[in-house]
Image: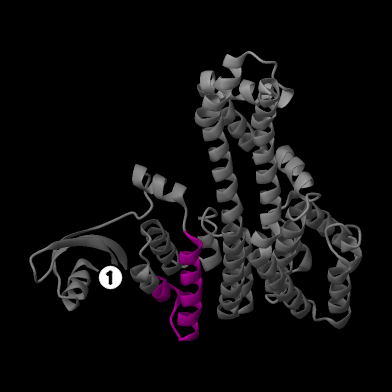
Amino acid sequence: MGIYSYTARGPDKKKSSGVLVAESEQSLGATLAEQGLSLIRAQTVDTLKPGLNNVLQRWQGVPVVQKIFFTQNLGVMLRGGFSISRAMATLALQTNHKYFKKVILSMQQDVEGGIPFAQTLRKFPHVFSEMFINMIAAGEVSGKLDDVLKSLTIQMKKDHQLASKVKGAMTYPIVVVVAMIGAAVAMVTFVIPRLLDVFDQNGAKLPLPTRILIAVSNAFQHQGIWIALGTIALVAGVILVARTKRGQWWFDTIFLVTPILSSIIKKVNLARFTRSLSSMLSTDIPIIQAFQVIGRTLSSPHYRQSIDDSADALRTGATIAKVLEKYPKLYPPLVQQMVNVGEESGTLDEVSAELAVFYEEDVDQTMANLSTIIEPVLLLFLGAGVAGMAVAILLPMYSLSEQIN
């Protein structure tokens, strides 16, 4: 079995090209003939050889939707009696993402050569998460690979839905804030100077708010380029700091005490923690190993640190509930008590799944109401800005009218 890059001609004499898995060039020609194509030329390919195109495709990454499609259909095909090699060869034909197709074909070749599926996944850590790989490895050992793939599909779908809802809910306030800033800059740069010229020409002593507005307007007019460059440099600096471990910790500390943001961050991380815990426990992965892997899947550094510390405590024989009690600000009593019940009854995987559903639904509700929650805050800032400008413009007008009278 090999991977062939081919060029073929259709009934309309138009040429087409692509990549297919076939036992030989003759087999490839027969496969194309069934599709109404006539093979012109073909050559075997090394699917992931170094090259600018592959590097760019790898940098762009593989969309989550593509990985969900692969995982779900692989599980369905295995339950239907397909071998892993044959299932992956078939899925590669159905995958329209060029780089992911190459990854699947490369794994298919390795599996056909006798390499365990989980080991082939480890060659692509930028595509498959550590949790994904560990669960597949556990599924291969236990003989429950199809069940593991089903659990992974549910996990990935839930994570994707969670991330989509958070991104979608944050789009509205970000657009509004950017529009407000843009309108304010336009007003200060183009509109306000024409109104304030009247006061400058009059020569009257201006109140403090008006002088501040004039200074800001002059700065944007005469130093606009430097202000823009300074803003870009500031944003770039913040992004660079946020990418460091210490910077992530600082920002997360601020976010966890910020109204609205704090609630969202906690619910999202609790949903992801409980969902991941349920998925990994259902595959009989040791609890310490499960905690080590889960810790690296959470977005909040504080939650990651708490899970890593918990893994160390579990080695000494402590229960999960007792460990979580050390972090009351991160894990509310509901989580602590439910985990305690799950441990005592031996149903921690089921309890974790129920907690995941609860927090996922809570996040859904929060995201749906986010615009309603944020609107008053945005209106408050907008009102304060408009009121400040109005005061700065109206005060000197009032003074001039008094002088005329």
In front here: 184 or 84? 184
Viewer-nearest residue: 184 or 123? 184
Q: Is residue 354 above or below residue 66?
A: below
- Along the line of sight, the residue nearer the viewer: 344 or 182: 182
In this picture, is 108 found above or below 72?
A: above
Q: Is residue 334 left or right of residue 66?
A: right
Q: Position of residue 251 (x, y in %)?
A: 73, 43
Q: Give the amino acid type for the residue marked by disc 1 in the picture.
A: Glu
Q: Is residue 237 magenta?
A: no
Dominant SS of magenta comes to helix
**To which quarter of the image does residue 310 belong?**
bottom right
Which of the image's four quarters has the N terminus? bottom left
Residue placed farthest to the front in the image? 405
Quadrant containing the C terminus is top right
Residue under circle 1? 23
What residue span does the magenta drawing correspond to? 63-88
Residue 349, position as x, y percentages in the image: 75, 77
Left or right? Give the position of 266 relative to 55: right
